[in-house]
Image: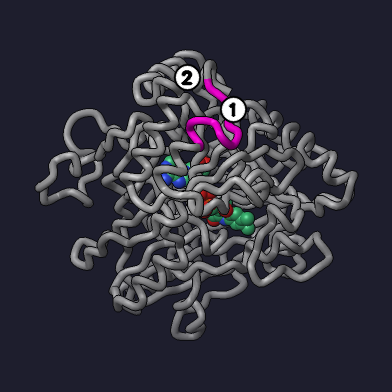
Amino acid sequence: MCEGSVLLSPGESALDEWIQLIGTDRVLTESIQHYGNTTHEGVSPVDAVLLPETRDEVAAILRIATRTRTPVSVAAGGKNWGLGSRIPHGGSRVVLDLCRMNSIREVNERMATMTVEPGVTFREAAMHLRRAGSRHFLSVTNGPADGSVIGNALERGDAVGPYGDRASHVADLEVVLADGRVLHTGMSRFPVCQAKSIDRHGLGPSLDGLFFQSCMGVVTAMSVWLRPKPARFGHLLFELSKEDYSIVDSLAQLALRGVLEPGCLSLWSPSKVLLQAGVSTQYWRGSAAFYGESDAHLGAVAALVAAGIGEHAILAFTTEAEEPAFLQSAYFGWPSDQSSKAIYAPMGFEPPEVLNPDSDRVGLIWLCAAVPFTGDAFSGMMAAAESVPVPEGITATLGFSMHSARVLRGFFGLHFDRDNPSAESSAVAVARRVRETFEERGFYPFRLGSPLIGKPLENGVTERVLDSIRGVLDPSRILMQDRYGFNR
Ligand SMILES: Cc1cc2nc3c(=O)[nH]c(=O)nc-3n(C[C@H](O)[C@H](O)[C@H](O)COP(=O)(O)OP(=O)(O)OC[C@H]3O[C@@H](n4cnc5c(N)ncnc54)[C@H](O)[C@@H]3O)c2cc1C
């Protein structure tokens, strides 16, 4: 908890002021303990949940928090399952839940951009574009359909398909600072600028990076970039022979040459294939997606990739004409809960209609690490993961997605039933050990979960500079801290 801040209990001044501001029906103090649950051991107490509906309400709430030195945590979709969900951090016991700020402010068909508020989910964005008859789609994650587009972007999440590196395909952040001031990043600081949602850096130093994985301000709107639907689509499913991972180097060459697009390749361990797709295999599986503007274009790209992979490993090549279901899949911006349902596999009961792993005692811990796009690094991370014994009752999975032509993002998962006492009591320790092993071998996290899984990284100067910047943007340090480790 930050120095000088006060713990909140009903009747204290911040709570009274917030109630005066937005009313008792939007300042919840009862039946809110689920906000403190996540998918592994450790519960965070929550005293109040605030439900603002407008940017001005967010500004007024933060002004009160700053004046009374009451720390707050922020959640948008609150579906950060496996990575700490929406539990408050840094001593905060108040959650600012932005789910009611769910307007889609604009879709610009010509420039292929969409401006959303934090409560807008992937499902809502996809429905909106479909209803509007848009020629474009917004790439979605493999995760919960009701995740927040902004929450996922601020975590620097990964999407399936083009523009998979979400944080690099957004612009125009509207940010409320802790003192209630509203800041616009990039070109949107110039109110009548014509290049607002499309030139993200603007003039001079770029401020937008400060608000990713930081909570140095509350983002109340963002423009995300859309991709035109392609004329043709193809999907290649292949297998990696266990003895030879040079195939990964071949794929990297194709990526460097622009044949394979970032976001369009993923590689899954046999245990992940079994858990997520229900298919038993002894080999790693890969899938690559191609977007073409004609038969000839698609055919040429697919042939180059197939040659790089080697015919013997290819299981299937399917186009959208043969398999129209692709048009309603994540590859075309259709979110689904299929993968999220699969995390219920260890539970011994069917996933409910409305998924809520935090309350359903589903055990899940993700560790995310950045890996060079080479066969050596790929097998190095695999060896690191395998070197840590995983007790009975916990299933370990590993997957990679192509973040760029040079970087793979590795996702190590621990899946278990939280009502299995031995799995519940050992999972966090196993995750910590795996994270240490990854770091010892040079595989550092690109995204962090709950602080229980290991302390944030420290690297001296960078951390101190970021902490100084936080001191300028949030002098009373009331916004959620501790997750990314640059607050003293
Ligand atoms: C089976 C499964 C598969 C998954 N696959 C993927 C995947 O393919 N790619 C991927 O990226 N993730 C994946 N995830 C992880 C996670 O579920 C998603 O990233 C999800 O989108 C995050 O939740 P959210 O969008 O609701 O964000 P939230 O939980 O609302 O927010 C995430 C973080 O951003 C901060 N934040 C949110 N809104 C704001 C704001 N307006 N201002 C300031 N800070 C804010 C919050 O404090 C929080 O720390 C997966 C999870 C599961 C269970």
The stretch in magenta equals 5-15
Disc 1 element: loop
Q: Position of residue 296 (x, y in %)?
A: 33, 76
Q: Which mark is residue 463?
A: 2
Left or right: residue 59 compared with residue 142? left
Q: CA distance from mark 2 to mark 1?
A: 27 Å
Determine which quarter of the picture holds residue 281: bottom right
Q: Position of residue 40 (x, y in %)?
A: 74, 44
Left or right: residue 46 compared with residue 167? right
Is disc 2 surrounded by few (<14), some (14 to 19) or many (20+) residues within 10 Å? some
Question: What kind of residue is marked 1?
Answer: Leu
Q: Residue at x 81, y 54 (%)?
A: 417
Check residue 7 for magenta coloring: yes
Say above or below: 480 vs 53.
above
Determine which quarter of the picture holds residue 175: top left
Say above or below: 449 vs 269.
above
Left or right: residue 328 compared with residue 284? left
Report the front residue among 470 and 390.
470
Check residue 135 for magenta coloring: no
Q: Residue at x 81, y 50 (%)?
A: 418
Report the front residue among 385 and 26.
26
Identify the residue position indicated by label 1 in the image.
7
